[in-house]
Image (spheres, coloured by chain):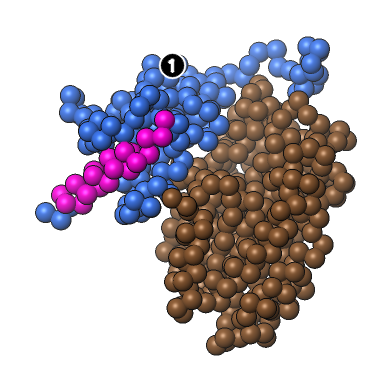
Chain colours: A brown, B blue
Amino acid sequence: MNNFSYTRAGDVATAVSEIARDNEAKFIAGGTNLIDLMKENVARPSRLIDITRLPFDKIEENEDGGLRIGALVTNTDVAYDEQVEKRYPLISEAILAGASQQLRNMATTGGNLMQRTRCYYFYDTATPCNKREPGTACSAINGFNRIHAILGASEHCIATHPSDMCVALAALEAAVRVTGKDGDRAIPFAEFHRLPGAAPQTDTNLRADEIITAVDLPAKGFAENYTYLKVRDRASYAFALVSVAAALEMDGSAIKEARLALGGVAHKPWRDAEAEAMLNGKEASKENFQKAAEAILRDAKGFGHNDFKIELAKRAVVRALRQASAMGEMGKRYDDKLHRTADKPR
Amino acid sequence: MNNKSDGEIVGKVPTSGPAKRSITLKVNGVEKRLEVAPWTTLLDLLREYLDLTGTKKGCDHGQCGACTVVEGRRVNSCLTLAIMKDGAEVVTIEGLAEGDALHPLQQAFIEHDAFQCGYCTPGQICSAVGLMNEGRAKTADEIRELMSGNICRCGAYPNIIAAVQEVMRASAGRAKR
């Protein structure tokens, strides 16, 4: 770890002014990702601004009939919150699919949004990486890229965003509330994270002087028909190779509204309006699910080791949609059983 | 600050480290006043400054769970900066027994032969204490899932599950009475 100084922010205004006057400073809350990166010499902040005593630790009703999750609410407290479990079970399911209970007890909502990729080259300071050292190279494109992106990548970076929670938040169209020197704003979830393009060092559209204060969940939680399906190398405590958040509003056996977000496949949770529109007003059938899966992966490109993800993602989309649409029916139990058997071999 | 390979140091390097800061920490029920540098982790503080070496350093990256302690809830002490925990209460493996009477989980780990090399055991037991406080796991599957942050390279998992289950059953029985 490098030498750094430590300040504890007593209020939001201080936190904002402290971060604005030092572009090598970083906020710290749960620290589960940042301290790890500091130990690896990937993050070398000049100072840490401890924000854990700021008043962002509550889950409250927001003015639109949804919920406002404070940026400092831990992953555990969100996942097990009674209102979240009841109204947004997709979020609980996604959070509990990620990390370990120890990490979820520490990690915060805001920090989950700000976590960095787990690309091995990003972590390995002996190799070039455009995200870590802009202008060097992407070692993954011609290297080991089994865990890397198949959608939205660029010649500069093929890293993926590692979060599970963010995939659910993308599907539910949450908004990220931030405050900075120019005041407050709400960033639609789809615009919070960015694609790598020519500037992979920048993960999000958060400005340098801004702090996340909360995540707003819209009133519509898709609590009846939803699935978070995560495919990974071991049954628990591993990052997604591919994950799917599927949220459906059903009208009998027809789909009124579909939301689909993919994790583990791109630099941000992947949504596709065209694929979702193909499902709206259609019967919940395997053929229609298959078409949507083909649509959402239509521009997918593998880099060798991760070619398998394209077919894997298609199948995961179909299965997630089957599970989500069949909830409350016989099919749900059947699919759940299938899911368990397939994901947790013993 | 970049430390170039030839030893040349680029960027602004403070001539001396930032000042240590005084914090108060209650460890296993005893209040301690400590001077800590910003980068001292709770794990290093416990082991190097307080000689509580029961808590183990495994991966030092939050991946293995050997450093698990209970700070209200179970956490990875290797990813916790001590300076941020001013005023906190921490329970380590050394704080579980009451005198010579082992904690039920410690006793059950012995009876079920739930370890071989023993290196992960303090973390496993502290994690299981947290698991029981949370009250979310009922079945063996749920215990496995919620204990997945503790790796045992000897592979003692079946016996660890059995030990945890036994203590859970016993405490559920006590609660009913």
Q: Which quadrant is the C terminus of chain B positioned in?
A: bottom left
Q: Tell me the magenta residue range.
A: B154-174
Residue ID at (59%, 76%):
A248
Give whichever of B26, B125 is nearer the camera.
Answer: B125
Give whichever of A230, A22 is nearer the camera.
Answer: A230
Judged from this view, the residue extending furthest toward the bottom is A252
Q: Quadrant of residue A118?
A: top right
Q: Which amino acid does the dot numbered 1 rest on?
A: Tyr
Examine the structure image and report whether residue B169 is included in the region drawn in magenta: yes
Q: In the displayed structure, does residue A232 sit left or right of residue A205? A: left
Count of numbered circles on the image: 1
Classify 10 Å Cα crowding around label 1: few (below 14), some (14-19), many (20 and above): few
Residue A112 appears in the picture as rendered: no
Q: Quadrant of residue B96?
A: top left
Examine the structure image and report whether residue A36 is included in the region drawn in magenta: no
Q: Which quadrant is the N terminus of chain B positioned in?
A: top right
Residue A41 appears in the picture as rendered: yes
Image coords of residue A314 (percent x, y) = 69, 64
Query: Which residue does the numbered mark 1 point to in the structure image?
Result: B49
Image coords of residue B160 (percent x, y) = 33, 38
Judged from this view, the residue extending furthest toward the front is A346
Q: In the displayed structure, does residue B153 sit left or right of residue A271? A: left
